[in-house]
Structures are given as C-alpha cells and as structure tokens.
Amino acid sequence: MTPAPRPRLHPDHRRDHQPPTVPRQYTVGWISLPPMRYPNHYTWFILFSALDIMLTWKILMKEGTEVNPVAALVIENWGLWGAIGFKFALMLFVIITCELVGRKRHFTGRWLARIAVTISIVPVVYSLGLLIHHVYWLTPVLEGSPAPSSI
C-alpha cells in the first residue's frame, strides 16, 4: 500500500522559505553580526546601482544632463567621486532599511529588497536606451559606411 501524497504548499509556506527563527551570530573581532537576510537581492541592487553611475557618467560626457536634481547638484559640486559617494550612501541606506525591516517582518523586508532591485533597473534601461539612440540615430553617417537600419 502506498502512502497518501503530501499536500503541496505555496512557495512562501515551504520550510526552506521560512525566515530563520534564531539567526546565527557571526563574530568579527569585537563586533557580533547576524547574517544578511537578502544577499542575492543586494547583489543585483548593487550591480544595477553601479551600472547607473557608469551610464550616467557616460551620458554626461556626451553632453547629456542629469535629470535627478539632487544628483545633479552633487555632480555639479563634487563630480564623479561625489556621484559615487552619493549613490553608495543611498544604497547603504536602502540595504540597512531592508535588514531592519526584515528582522521584524521577513516577507516585508524581502518585498522591500525586491522593490529596490526593480527601481534600480529603471534608470539603467533608460540610460541604455538613450545611449543606443545617440549612437545609432544621432551620429553622422560616414561616407561609404552603411546607414543604420530603422527598427
């Protein structure tokens, strides 16, 4: 006789998706730190944020403008290094917020981390679109080279 099949659980209710009841403590010297809750989300968030800085700087070097007024002020006063510091300070704030919220409410913290990744994708896609548009539609066609095809 075969045993009855186990009921299927929604992915958020499986054991491997539950938040740890007591997080392990990591000790580094005199500092004791719990593990980060959403490292995969943070990796993507940092990647897209860094791409945002790189693409923004490339657009600024091609005589473009920064549309975020706060970031434009930072870039105007402190240049590339100010933009990098400003962006990484914002990233640190978002990651700490996700961690603090996630310690009290796991699924809300994960939702915040996902939203941060989603929002950080938007300027990257927009900047890539601007750069592609600039390269393929605004550069003069050299004599003897084929014209770019229209999409």
Image: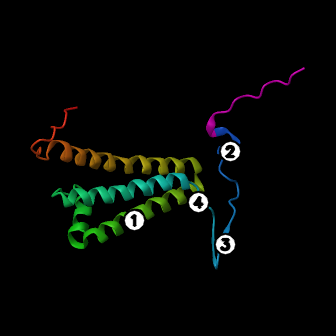
Mark 4 or mark 3, which has the lower sequence index?
Answer: 3
Examine the image and state in which quarter residue 81 appears.
Answer: bottom left
Per the image, the residue denoted by label 2 is 16
Which region shows up in magenta?
1-12
Mark 1 or mark 2, which has the lower sequence index?
Answer: 2
Examine the image and state in which quarter residue 142 appears.
Answer: top left
Could you say where residue 104 lies in the image, as x and y percent from the top left? 59, 55
As measured in the structure, the alpha-carbon distance from the residue carrying label 1 to the one carrying label 2 is: 32 Å
Q: Residues within 10 Å of mark 4 (few under 14, many from 20)?
A: some
As measured in the structure, the alpha-carbon distance from the residue carrying label 4 to the one carrying label 3 is: 13 Å
Per the image, the residue denoted by label 1 is 88
As measured in the structure, the alpha-carbon distance from the residue carrying label 3 to the one carrying label 2 is: 25 Å
Give, as a three-letter code, the residue at label 1: Phe
Per the image, the residue denoted by label 3 is 27
Could you say whether the residue bearing mark 3 is in a helix, strand or loop? strand
Q: Pointers 3 and 2 in contact (CB under 8 A)?
A: no
Where is the N terminus found, in terms of image quarters?
Answer: top right
Q: Residues within 10 Å of mark 3 (few under 14, many from 20)?
A: few
Give, as a three-letter code, the residue at label 2: Asp
Q: Residue at x 16, y 42 (%)?
A: 137
Per the image, the residue denoted by label 4 is 36
Q: Residue furthest bottom?
A: 30
Could you say where residue 44 lies in the image, as x and y percent from the top left? 46, 52
Q: Is residue 3 visible?
A: yes
